[in-house]
């Protein structure tokens, strides 16, 4: 969502923006990242990925379907939900947790 050209300009020199879905393999773990939640259950049921990370809803989601860990970190800014959250992922044991950030306004 949002102005993709603007985001690309702002991220220049910091990192890259990839088109969704973005698949990668880190430490022999197949990971897919996407923005919207529409395909989450089907992707998890395929058991092709150890980790699925998505966003869009601004609501935290941390669950497993089979061997697949599904993560939505919520929203870091806290503007829509009133909660500033991130997700921490340990790739060694595939455990994850949602952490609420203390934000002063």
Image (tube, grey):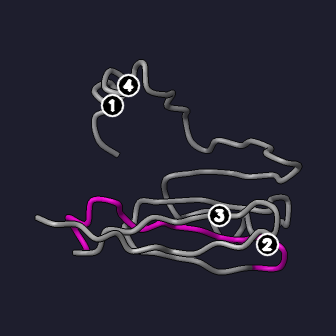
Residue at label 3?
89
Distance in Å between CA atoms under marks 4 and 2: 33 Å
What percent of the width, then of the height, locates residue 5? 32, 24
Work out whether mark 2 precedes mark 1 in sequence or the reverse, and give the earlier one. 1
Task: Magenta stretch: give its range.
Answer: 65-81
Point out the image quarter for the C terminus.
Answer: bottom left
Query: In what element is the residue under mark 4?
Result: helix
Residue at label 4?
8
Between 12 and 32, the residue placed more toward the observer is 12
Q: Residue furthest right?
A: 28
What percent of the width, then of the height, locates residue 101? 34, 69
Query: In what element is the residue under mark 3?
Result: strand
Residue occupying the point 75% across, 79% down? 65
- Answer left or right for 99 relative to 82: right
Work out whether mark 1 precedes mark 3 in sequence or the reverse, and give the earlier one. 1
Q: Where on the picture, by quarter, is residue 80? A: bottom left
What percent of the width, then of the height, locates residue 22? 64, 41
Foreground: disc 1 or disc 3: 3
Q: How crowded is mark 3: few (under 14 residues within 10 Å), some or many (20 or more)?
A: some
Q: Is residue 96 above or below residue 23?
A: below
Residue at label 2?
45
Residue occupying the point 80% across, 44% down? 25
């Amino acid at each position: 969502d949002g102005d993709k050209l603007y985001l690309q300009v702002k991220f220049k020199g910091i990192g890259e923006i990839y088109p969704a879905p973005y698949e990668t393999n880190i430490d022999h773990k197949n990971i897919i990242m996407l923005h919207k939640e529409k395909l989450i259950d089907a992707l998890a049921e395929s058991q092709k990925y150890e980790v699925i990370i998505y966003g869009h809803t601004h609501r935290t989601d941390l669950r497993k379907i089979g061997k697949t860990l599904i993560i939505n970190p919520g929203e870091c800014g806290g503007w829509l939900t009133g909660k500033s959250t991130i997700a921490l992922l340990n790739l060694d044991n595939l455990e994850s947790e949602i952490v609420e950030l203390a934000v002063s306004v």
